[in-house]
Amino acid sequence: GDSVTQMEGPVTLSEEAFLTINCTYTATGYPSLFWYVQYPGEGLQLLLKATKADDKGSNKGFEATYRKETTSFHLEKGSVQVSDSAVYFCALSDPETSGSRLTFGEGTQLTVNP
Amino acid sequence: GAVVSQHPSRVICKSGTSVKIECRSLDFQATTMFWYRQFPKQSLMLMATSNEGSKATYEQGVEKDKFLINHASLTLSTLTVTSAHPEDSSFYICSATRTGGMFGYTFGSGTRLTVV
């Protein structure tokens, strides 16, 4: 079945540092890929998405490129801020095998210190 | 943009009572709604998928009689935790989509349930 694997956290960075959170996936169809962010005590917010190979999703300085050859969708940001502290979830949607459901990774806690 | 409203945000109830959580899509018709449970510092666990007008599809290991899901309209789904016990304490999140996820998924803000 479909699965998503994220790098283990937690990740602690200083403000303005470069961020990478690795995400790899396994899917039998042609999935769409997502990054969601969860702030403490809240639901999930869509950060960015990509629907086909080589697509690059971007939002608020975050980027991720859909790499079919390496089955990856790594999240990057060039200069993190304290306000980026949150939990980040990589997810995929594979209608051919899983219908309309989302498959989530384990989540990565990011803490950015001033 | 698409907005999903989830209420209540927090609820405390006594053991043995039932609690209802509502999930409303405010500006779109949600053909499918999902209910998740999240334990501290863990990922989201899908509990069930509900399509408007039909019975919910529960994931393996989720008790149908304990977690009652109703999706009576295209804008409202409810999750009722029946005869709640302390082990049901958790963070519950709903999500809604239309047309099989093609237009993305919108999440509610979550409900923190504490059973005492």
Image (cartoon, grey):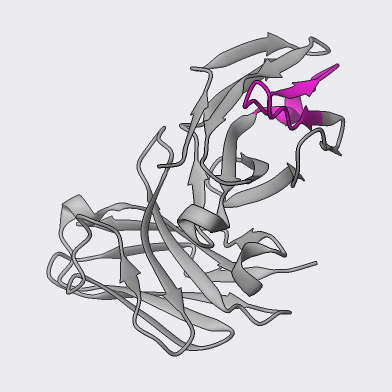
Say which residue appears at 53% left-offset and 73% top-offset.
B32
Asked if the magenta segment contains residue A66, the reply would be yes
B43 in relation to B70, above or below: above
In the figure, residue B85 lies in which quadrant? bottom left
Whole-percent x, y for residue B5 in the image: 60, 71
Residue at the image point whose x is 78% and y is 29% from the top: A65
Query: Which quadrant would residue A79 be assigned to in this image?
Result: top right
Provide the major secondary structure of the magenta segment: loop
Q: Quadrant of residue B105?
A: bottom right
Depth check, front residue: A96 or A2: A96
Q: Position of residue B91 (x, y in %)?
A: 40, 52
Q: Is residue A114 magenta?
A: no
Residue A43 vs A22, above or below: the answer is below
Compared across the picture, whether A74 is left or right of B15 comes to: right
Q: Is residue B98 visible?
A: no
Foreground of the two, B21 or A26: A26
Judge left or right: residue B46 versus residue B7.
left
Which region shows up in magenta? A63-85
Q: Is residue A84 visible?
A: yes
Name the side, left or right, on which A2 lies relative to A12. Answer: left
Using the image as rendered, state which of residue A79 and residue B65 is in the foreground.
Answer: B65
In the shown orientation, is residue B81 left or right of residue A61? left
A8 over A109 or under it: above or below: above
Q: From the image, which quarter does the C terminus of chain A lie in?
A: top right
Residue at figure coordinates x 40%, y 42% from the top left: A1
Residue sitting at 66 percent across and 42 percent down?
A33
Q: Position of residue A22 (x, y in %)?
A: 62, 20
Nearest to the observer: residue A96 or residue A91: A96
Residue B15 percent across, percent down from the top left: 14, 64
